[in-house]
Image (tube, grey):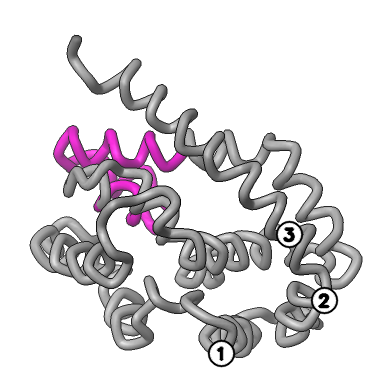
Amino acid sequence: MYLLQSELNFLAHIALSQKNPPWMVGNFLADFLKPSETVDLPEDIIQGIKIHQNIDAFTDHHPDVKKSILRMSHYQGKYAPVVIDICFDFFLCKYWDLYYIDRLEVFIDDSYKVFQDYHKYFPQSFQAMFERMIKFDFLNSSMNKDRLVANFIKLQTRVKFENQLPNAVDHLFLNLYEYETEFLNFYPDLIKSTDEFILKNYVEI
């Protein structure tokens, strides 16, 4: 799965980090770090990693996410969870203004600046991939239908097994109402769950 993770739902993970730079960095790096590479990280970046893990756990068990994955699995098989991650970032771009005050393009530019500021904490093994991700403008990779198509075509080059990834967008738009409704049910729940996790664990009252 490691090779697939440069196109997953990083926008959602970073957006849920409450604009806290170390949390944004940890939330971003979580899928790329080996346990041994987290030992010397600052505590607040490790907190971001734990926020990421909480997001993943909540997402995996949400009934609307399960509905989306089940429907997509008939067309994408074992890649359905990856496809849904990407498609949900597409919906997050579309409905960004429902959830956040900052304009999306401003948030993305600010996120790239944060990553540059914290670049010294990125593992050496990840540096080359990060440069490719920046070149691909990865936080904008689900911005619209054309970028979504390009995302899945690019993703197809990274998997070894037979797949139908380039057809994912056609299926998404043929069933747009169902997937969109499931995202709109799910994302507010995810925001609430993440905020509660942060409040419980990392905010002093």
* Magenta span: 25-53
Residue furthest toward the top?
Answer: 205
User: Could you say which is closer to the camera, residue 62 or residue 3?
Assistant: 62
Q: Residue at x 77, y 84 (%)?
A: 167
Quick one: quadrant of the C terminus? top left
Q: For numbered disc 2, what is the local secondary structure?
A: helix
Label 3 close to label 1 by CB (< 8 Å): no
Question: Which comes before the other along the chain, label 3 or label 1?
Answer: 1
- Numbered badge on residue 179: 3
Q: Is residue 30 left or right of residue 91?
A: left
Image position of 181 with respect to 83: above or below: above
Callout 3: 10 Å neighbours few (<14), some, many (20+)?
many
How far apart marks 1 and 2 lie (CA) works out to 16 Å
Look at mark 1 in the image and give the residue it sits on.
Answer: 146
Mark 1 surroundings within 10 Å by alpha-carbon count, few (fewer than 14), some (14 through 19), many (20 or more) = few
Secondary structure of the residue carrying numbered label 1: helix
Q: CA distance from mark 3 to mark 2?
A: 10 Å
> Where does the image place residue 94, in percent across and percent down from the top left?
51, 67
User: Which of the labelled discs sits on residue 174, or is there none?
Assistant: 2
Magenta stretch secondary structure, dominant: helix
Which one is earlier in the sequence, the residue at label 1 or at label 2? 1
